[in-house]
Amino acid sequence: MKTQDMHIGMHVSHPDLGVGEVVSLGRGMAEIQFESGSREVSPENSSIEPLESEAHLNGLKMPLEKLIAHVAQSTVDALDLERPGSVVEELAQRWQGGKMVLHTKDPALQPKEVELETFFHKIVMMRNNLRVLEQKVNNSKQLSEADKFDIQQYISRCYGSMTTFNVLFRHKEDQFRSK
């Protein structure tokens, strides 16, 4: 590891000395506080490795992976998006485990089969994306009211076209509705 890749407060691991925290940095040297005491070490010659990245926000100190997972989950919740497994719960019982089969006009060609759960997941993703688009349009400060109205009409037509698939939904409130 190079000294310039280090920063004060960084946690590192040394093969012989264990885990430590960088206290100061100099030319090609780093002072690291280990459990056994403070040592001056040459990072390039001592097989020092950085530990897991951390994020420090307003005094909050946690593993970066945990912070990213928390932010991602908060984003999913804020956008009201479903996890793939939860989408199947919205699928009406009679369709679960079913397949959609598409036949071509030419009987010599093989039909295409798609699991209904997979197809339904894509339908629900379209519904969710339409909802997000609708929110973005309604909250936009750059669009005029006339532009918002025009875009909203296209979104409503999309909802109307998607009502064909309402038969797949378990609950009426989850279905597409023309707005």
Image (spheres, rainbow, N blue to C red):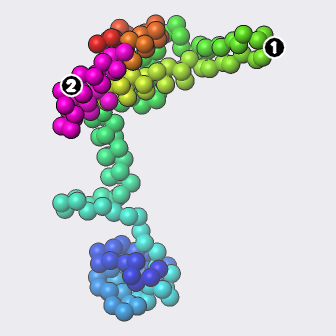
Magenta stretch in the rendered image: 133-157
Using the image, tell me which numbered label, if any, was put on residue 146.
Answer: 2
Q: Residues within 10 Å of mark 2 (few under 14, many from 20)?
A: few
Q: Can residue 37 be seen in this view?
A: no
Residue drawn where x is 35% and y is 8% of the image: 172
Q: In which quarter of the image is residue 178?
A: top left
Does 59 sit left or right of 158 as displayed? left
Residue 20: give its label: none
Taking the image as shown, residue 101 lies to the left or right of residue 110, namely left
Label 1 neighbour load within 10 Å: few <14, some 14-19, many 20+ = few
Above or below for 23 versus 158: below
Query: Residue 20 location, x and y as percent?
Result: 36, 77
Asked whether 30 falls inside the magenta stretch, the response is no
| Image spot of residue 28 (x, y percent) | 40, 91
Mark 2 or mark 1: which comes first in sequence?
1
Q: Is mark 2 on a helix, strand or loop?
A: helix
Q: Is residue 147 magenta?
A: yes
Q: Is mark 1 on a helix, strand or loop?
A: loop
Q: Name the residue under label 1.
A: 108
Which residue is at a point 47% across and 80% down the rendered structure image?
A: 1
Q: Of residues 37 and 98, which is closer to you in this image?
A: 98
In the foreground, 155 or 94: 155
Q: Distance between the residues labelled 2 and 1?
A: 52 Å
What is the three-letter code of the residue carrying label 1?
Answer: Ala
Q: Which amino acid lies under the numbered mark 2 shown in the image of this protein?
A: Ala
Q: Are marks 2 and 1 in contact (CB under 8 Å)?
A: no
Q: Which of 142 and 94 is in front in this view?
A: 142
Helix, strand or loop: magenta stretch:
helix
Q: What residue occupies the far right of the structure in this picture?
A: 108
Q: Residue furthest bottom?
A: 27
